[in-house]
Amino acid sequence: MENSKVLAKVGDVEITEDIVNKTIESLRPEQRAYFETETGKKQLLDNLVNMELINAEGEKMGIPSSDLFRTEMERMQKDLLMQITLAKVMEDINLTDEDVEKEMAENADAYRESESFGAKHILVEDEALAKEIKGKIDSGEMTFEEAAREYSTCPSSEKGGDLGSFGRGMMVPEFEKATEEAEIGKVTDPVKTQFGYHLIDVYQKGADRNLVKNTLLQKKQMERYNSFVSDLRKKAGF
């Protein structure tokens, strides 16, 4: 395997292309995009060179043998040891779909504001027309999507009336209330709003599962942490 191309040399330290690429890979996605450009890579290389120059100067000044340096290194070592130890203690905490469903059911009120919906709708100006369209859908004469494409005045008609996913407060109150009360897969009666009359077909509703999962995971981790620390304190006589 060929050695990585040397981009800069500071004293005996070589900064290679591989070092730059690995540094970029370690960055958060939103940062990585910039540093993957030529301008970003040049800036990163300059930063690495500056760091080596400063470190070399610190060596000359005897910083590594100072009390402050040793104290900070000990503190960082202890912090790192604690982080890795706790990560090891927590590594077997796994959440199942049943765990998430149970959390959502038992704490529904706590997650109510994060609830999201997925729905399709058909918007027309006339209530009588809305009822006529619903009749055609209920009888099987047309699918909801076909009716949306033919009758709906909303731009979502091109997608069969699909509005995608939306949260609370994103729709007018009458629409949100009807969506909340609707049965999944059952087309509502015409719902009047300032825009006209809507037929709504809700296909998804519930709390944000990722939020629930993260909250539950944090809860279990805190329980494990408290139990772990409590046992250690008892063993140590505290």
Image (cartoon, rainbow, N blue to C red):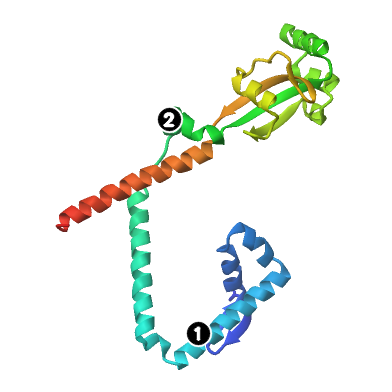
Other-residue count near label 2 (Cα within 10 Å), few / some / many at <14 / 14–19 / ≥20: few
Residue carrying label 1? 55
Residue carrying label 2? 98
Residue 203, horizontal then vertical, whole percent: 63, 24
34 w.r.t. 225: above or below: below
80 w.r.t. 149: above or below: below
Q: Is residue 107 left or right of residue 25?
A: left
Q: Label 2's element?
A: helix
**Residue 181 seen in the figure:** yes
Residue 59, horizontal then vertical, whole percent: 45, 89
The quadrant of the rendering that contains the N terminus is bottom right
Depth check, front residue: 4 or 131: 131
**Residue 1 seen in the figure:** no
Amino acid type for the residue under numbered disc 2: Glu
Q: Quadrant of residue 172?
A: top right
Amino acid type for the residue under numbered disc 1: Asn
Q: Label 1's element?
A: helix
61 w.r.t. 128: above or below: below
- Mark 2 or mark 1, earlier in chain: 1
Residue 111: numbered disc: none
